[in-house]
Amino acid sequence: MANQAGASSSTPLEPGFEDDENNMYGAESGWVEARTSCDHLASLSSDLARIPTPDTPCNRCQHPSENWLCLSCKDVLCSRFVNKHMLQHFHQTSHCLALSYSDLSVWCFACDSYLDARVIMQLKPVSETAYILKFGEAPPFRSVECSKGNQADGGASSDS
Ligand SMILES: [Zn+2]
Ligand SMILES: [Zn+2]
Ligand SMILES: [Zn+2]
């Protein structure tokens, strides 16, 4: 009697997960949850339609790339992995909202957390502007009309 089922107590996990793409925004593997609200949005600059380009060097040390944009005064300053000038700027000015020109994420120093620019309406325009400056095209933003539809993401597609 060849009992096929139940013979494998240890299921082989192959390294090439097919679902890897779908999981990359899941809770696993170091993805940090972004906040969908922030109490400090009042400090956003009123004019974020024009922002410095992503290759703008740090205002203080001229570090050439992967800097942060202060969303309050539009200063471009380097990251905590370089000379911490964005962090210093926060301590000196309390400007807590910064957009990374490295990966276009938005960080709130006061919340000590990433902010979800797709959900927080005040951040969406500048996030899109930065994307266009960086990539030269409008962002896909993991489009809700994506044909995969692996999760019913209802009601998110109201046109503006
Ligand atoms: Zn905040
Ligand atoms: Zn710097
Ligand atoms: Zn600032």
Image: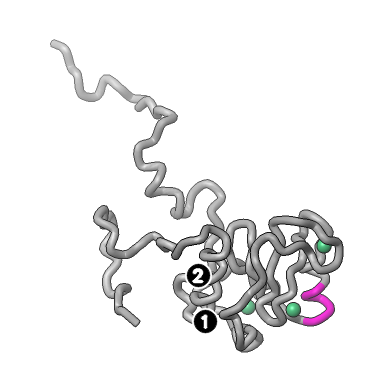
Tell me the number on the disc at residue 122. Answer: 1
Q: Decide if residue 96 is on the left or right side of residue 154.
A: right
Q: Quadrant of residue 38?
A: bottom right
Which residue is label 2 attached to? 128
Q: Secondary structure at mark 2?
A: helix
For the question of whether residue 110 can be seen, the reply is no
Residue 101 visible within the image: yes
Q: Earlier in the sequence, mark 1 or mark 2?
A: 1
- Which residue is painted at 70% across and 77% down in the image? 74
Residue that appears at 52% across and 65% down = 132
Q: Which residues are magenta?
A: 89-93
- Graded by Cα atoms within 10 Å as few (under 14), some (14 to 19) or many (20 or more), the crowding at tag 1 reads some
Q: Are marks 1 and 2 in contact (CB under 8 Å)?
A: no
Amino acid type, residue under disc 2 in the picture: Glu
Q: Amino acid at mark 1?
A: Gln
| Label 1 residue SS | loop
Q: Height in image: 107 above or below 22?
A: below
Residue at position x 68%, y 60% from top? 55
Ligand 1, by image quadrant, is bottom right
